[in-house]
Image (tube, rainbow, N blue to C red):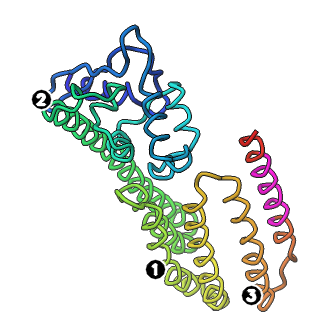
Amino acid sequence: MRRQRQNNWGTSLSTCGLPCGINQKAVASPGGTAYNVPITHEGGQVQLGALIRELRTERGLTQQQLADRLGVTDKAVSKWERDICCPDIALLLPLAAVLGVTVSELLAGRRGPENTAPAVEDMVVSAISYTETARKKNSLDWRLLAFMGLTASSIIATATCLICDLAVNGRYLWSPPVYPSVGLAWLVCTPLLLARRHPARWSLAVLTVAVLPYLCGLGWMLKQPLVIKMSIWIAPIGLAYLWLLYFLCLRLHRRRWLAAGWGLLLAAPLAAGVNFVVDCYVDSSGYHNVWIALLCAAACFAVDYIQERWRKV
């Protein structure tokens, strides 16, 4: 019952989950009591979107500028102002701070002294904080379950390879290289599941530290010095590209096709460098992957251009 009350607020103010055309929203308080917080005026006419648009205009902010401060898209802000959907509960506090009003005024859809009472404001902020804490706890539970599933899968995969190799060959012939490969995959995926902040950054950091020792160890286990020689050159190039791609996606996360185009464009010299290194030791299949990356990059740039033109129209 308590969890159901906690979820009432998160359901009522999902990013685009529920239209704002109802008179009241149920908010779970820290004590478990449900409070109804009005977000409309009398007659059922929605005022939240109008208030957001009015406050944004007063502060000389465009929809894109407001979206940048909140970490959302300008389309989301447009939907709020047109009352197609309501802001997510996690955005209420920063949205109120940017617009210069209290959370109570924001939820009421109008400014006024009746919405600025300290007791009311404290109640609303406490309810939001409590619900956010409960939601993060539930999210952490799911991540822990996923981590346990990943660990169990890694152990089962390793044991299966060991048993099959021993049963078929009578000794460990091909299975030893599998163990460090599974271990590396487990190390890289663990931050994605457990890190609370910047999971992709932590995952890349783990990969940066572990990939070169892994490749060298793999070459030693396979008794292939060529693997070690090539990995010394290829691994730093690949890691530099992944970090550059990560920060590029952070910078252009609102224009995904543009980010994809730049990623593919940067992949072309990466592929050329890898092919050059491979050519120094063995015969490669040519530079077809470079041309494929360039063509895909051009296609992504074209899609981004069309989208931007359509958005301006």
Q: Which residue is mark 3?
A: 277
The stretch in magenta equals 293-306
Residue sitting farthest toward the top: 43
- Give the residue at x 57% y 69%: 169
Sequence-first disc among 1 and 3: 1
Task: State the image coordinates of residue 255 (x, y, percent, origin top left).
Answer: 65, 52
Q: Residue at x 77, y 90 (%)?
A: 281
The reply to whether discs 1 and 3 touch (Cβ–Cβ < 8 Å) is no
Pair 2/3: label in front: 2
Helix, strand or loop for disc 3: helix
Label 3 Cα crowd, 10 Å radius (few <14 / some 14-19 / many 20+): some
Q: Which is nearer the N-term, disc 1 or disc 2?
A: 2
Q: Amino acid at mark 3?
A: Val
Q: Residues within 10 Å of mark 2 (few under 14, many from 20)?
A: few
Q: Position of residue 98 (x, y in %)?
A: 38, 47
> At numbered mark 2, what does the secondary structure look like: helix, strand or loop?
loop
Instruction: From the image, tell me which residue sits under label 2.
Output: 31
Q: Report the quarter where the C terminus lies.
A: top right
Any magenta on residue 272? Answer: no
- Residue at figure coordinates x 78%, y 57% from the top left: 301
**Vertical side of 194 occupied by 312: above or below:** above
